[in-house]
Image (cartoon, rainbow, N blue to C red):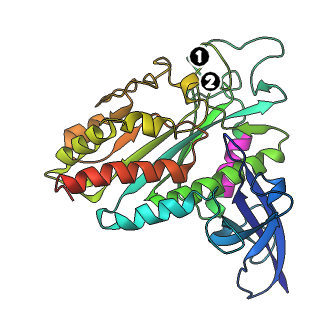
Amino acid sequence: MTFKAEYIWIDGTEPTAKLRSKTRILADGAELPLWGFDGSSTNQAKGHSSDCVLKPVYTCPDPIRGGGEGDVLVLCEVLNTDLTPHESNTRAELAEVAERFAAQEPVFGIEQEYTFFEGDRPLGFPVGGFPAPQGGYYCGVGVDEIHGRDVVEAHLENCLRAGLGISGINAEVMPGQWEFQVGPLPALTVADQLWIARWLLYRTAEDFGVAATLDPKPVKGDWNGAGAHTNFSTKAMREGPEGYAAIITACESLGEGSKPLDHVKNYGAGIDDRLTGLHETAPWNEYSYGVSDRGASVRIPWQVEKDGKGYIEDRRPNANVDPYVVTRLMVDTCCAALEKAGQV
């Protein structure tokens, strides 16, 4: 007997990496081996030395091939042939930072927004025109407000059958725009699972004849962009009575010196198109934080202020952000500041 292993990896396409995958048939009980691929076809190698290596790092049941016994999805890191991390491998750097600050128990919840397209227009946009202005689409119901729910429900079921830590879904502000949330989970786990959930989104949408995009501003003009709001906390932030002081330290650290621009330039390509100061965003080149303020760079939920402990929401990351990068930056910046302040 055999099982199918779908090896999934992140390629070297710039400015925004793409997901790639291929299938390997293995004997029942076999361990998942290292595997290779042609890096010259994925923007990760030159043709004269094209071999790259896939190293399995996260495995879950394959809900697409639900009829197979033991079929799995296998998320992989990309290595060079000497088994060192490839330059496109952002997971390896996160692993080092996560280990360094593991004692602070950083946890993330990422809100992944995305937009369905049918041909060259968002799902729900009429041919040659525009739908009614934004207002009734967010968390709406009914065929005049909602487009793509069948795909969204199928994707949710696939994520749950894969064992991913999906915590919710909702329709977003623009027609054809949706969101799912992953977490709360540790940095490496939330990033691994988000990449798998993205792969499942693309693969599920295939079966419905639509495309899903993480474009941060899929429609120019007076339409909301798509983000990946990143919720973050450490043990000190989650626990009273000094939790709120730790939250303020984390917020302040994200605004110190060059940190705001260091983060924003790594929060996804096209961020200046989305972070304009309109449509529930702060300007990309200004940093701010506030309680219950969706126009700030970082929001402190009202319940967090009331309880004196909890988490913060970085609202700047684009939908197309690399979750390995955003979690690394937030852990490195916030945890170092908390450590320096003795709030661990």
- Residue displayed at 51% across by 36% down: 265
Overall secondary structure of the magenta section: helix
The image quadrant of residue 32 is bottom right
Neighbor class of circle 1 (other Cα within 10 Å; few <14, some 14-19, many 20+) is: some
Q: Can residue 227 be seen here?
A: yes
Q: Can residue 308 be seen here?
A: no
Q: Earlier in the sequence, mark 1 or mark 2?
A: 1
The percent position of residue 15, horizontal first and vertical second, equals: 66, 39
- Residue displayed at 46% across by 34% down: 316
Residue bounds of the magenta highlight: 150-158
Q: Which mark is residue 134?
A: 1
Figure check: 19 above or below 290: below
**Quarter of the image where the N terminus is located:** bottom right
Instruction: Please give left or right for residue 251 compared with residue 22 in the image.
Output: left
Figure check: 210 above or below 193: above
Q: Mark 2 points at which residue?
A: 174
- Considering every residue shown, the one lying at the far left of the view is 241
Q: Element at badge 2?
A: loop
Q: Nearer the viewer, residue 15 or 126?
A: 15
Q: As shown in the figure, which amino acid type bears the numbered disc 1?
A: Gln
- Considering every residue shown, the one lying at the far front of the view is 48
Q: As shown in the figure, which amino acid type bears the numbered disc 2?
A: Met
Q: Which of 217 and 17 is in front in this view?
A: 17
**CB of mark 1 within 8 Å of CB of mark 2?**
yes
- Residue displayed at 67% across by 55% down: 157
Let me know if residue 156 is in the magenta part: yes
**Quarter of the image where the C terminus is located:** bottom left
